[in-house]
Image (cartoon, rainbow, N blue to C red):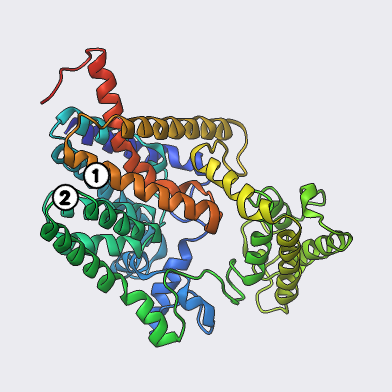
Amino acid sequence: SHVLLFGFVLRLLFVLVGAQYYFGRTNIHQDNDTMSWMYSFINWWEHGEYTVTLNDAGAYFNRAPVYSFFLGFFYLLSGKDLPHTFLWASWTQLFLDLLVIWMLYKIVLKASSKQAIALLASFLYACYPFVIVWIPVAYSEELSLFLMISGFYLIQNKNQLVLGGMALALGALCRFQVILLVPAILVVTFFSKADWTYKLKRIIILGTTVVLCYGIWPARNYFLHQRFVLFQDGHTDSYDACYTYDVYAFWNWMNTMQTQIEPQFTQIITNDTAITFPQVAYTCPQDSQLIRKGVYLLKHCSSGISFFQGYWKEPLMHNPNCNAEIVSIFDTLKAHQIKAHPWRVYLVVPLMNLQKCFFKFNLVNRKGLVLWMGRLLFSYRTLLLLLGFLGLLLMKNEALELKQLCRIIFVFLCIWYLILAFIYRDTEIRYFMQNDVLMLIPAAVFLYQLARRFKLIKSEH
């Protein structure tokens, strides 16, 4: 109860006082991507089309449905008032997060049979900053986290494989990385020392439930729109969407050379005249001209760039754009990179991404006190990850159920971090949230063993 109260006070203080300073604005409930979920529901409700943008073949797959319908509930409840929709959603997220604190305590208590470890894990979560900062924002992070932990709780504590599988599937339809927990659970279950009948029963029930529940999304994509989209596709041709094909073409080229798209991307948005690219960008004499032309076109006639916050002139709206030409230029530049530096593209840069998964210390486009606070928080995250890995190594004397839980966490982390580093190539901090939260469990094990070694707490048996 004390941990819950502490977590509630921290979250309340951040929402009421701290958030506006952290985000640098008074509207703390809406961010760049919020309306993509909201428009998806509004278009479904008013036009019968679940799509971010009407009359755009690519926009049907931009957002999976669970968070859109979560916002849609408050949209209808508020009488279609958007400010109240986001306000009520954020307060609901706060109380859902309190339930996560409680469920995490129960999960660890059952797995370890040690109240001290359960209290430590729930306390680490209660004050974990990278969860707290997303509570007031109408983004899918918090709901996906709630559904993921709910799935764990139902499977482990209540032995409810069907309900737990449904929770994990719904969580994956908020944030797709949650689906990777399922193969992690199935693999660890398969190699456990339990009876084969017991193992196969759990694997079949859980696997079938997730496939049937989650499979509604790709089935909808295929049968209604003749495209097999398993997760989501942010590419679009819309005139009023940021994530057009030309934007992705520029990002994909940048990701062959470095671990982030900044500062060059913001410099393009703001029409900065002093944009520089790494020397490796220039693989042949033709590249210099292509880069200059591509940057000019992005600044002046990219419909996607024109809708990003801070764009230096008015959005293009329905004016003609040069998106197709931009795509051609940066696809060509990307091909040049692959031909000239294949090892860098396919190994060196991904390994640099992998390093950032663990050792990321800077916020993008932040200055002064916020920048240094960000570095401090990122350092705290890295410390907790290191403690988590130490905890994974010190499981010898812990309960079998806790060992199994931590093996699942480790497999999940390995799968997702490798996908982020080598395939997705985006190390935005919120994409790590699910992994980071679960790694608090082995971190709590290490802190418990450390405290017991120095006789700060009594041993529990």
Q: Out of 125 and 7, give the one closest to the viewer.
A: 125
- In this rendering, the answer to whether 229 lies above or below 364 is below
**Residue type of the residue flagged with mark 2:** Gln
Q: Secondary structure at mark 1?
A: helix
Marks 1 & 2, CB-CB < 8 Å contact: yes
Q: Where residue 329 appears, x then y in whole percent? A: 76, 69
Estimate how packed mark 1 is, as few (under 14), some (14 to 19) or many (20 or more) residues with alpha carbons within 10 Å. many
Q: Is residue 3 above or below residue 279?
A: above
Q: Please state if 346 lies on the left or on the right of 428 as rendered.
A: right
Tell me if I can see residue 432 in this picture. yes
Question: Going 70% across and 71% down the picture, which residue do you hit?
Answer: 327
Q: How many marks?
A: 2
Could you say which is closer to the camera, residue 104 or residue 51?
104
Q: Compared to 17, does 41 lie above or below?
A: below
Q: Which mark is residue 343?
A: none
| Position of residue 267 measured from the top left corner of the image (x, y, whole percent) | 73, 52
Question: Residue 248: x percent and y percent?
Answer: 62, 65
Answer with left or right where residue 277 lies relative to residue 417: right
Residue beneath the point at 21% across and 30% down: 117
Q: Residue at x 65, y 75 (%)?
A: 317
Q: Nearer the viewer, residue 28 or 331?
A: 331
Residue 355: name its quadrant: top right
> Secondary structure beneath disc 2?
helix
Which residue type does callout 1 highlight?
Answer: Leu
- Label 1: which residue? 405
Work out how far the residue at label 1 is from the one at label 2, CA to CA, in angstroms.
9 Å
Residue that appears at 19% across and 30% down: 2
Q: Is residue 28 visible?
A: no
Which dot marks residue 156?
2
In primary-sequence order, the first of circles 1 and 2 is 2
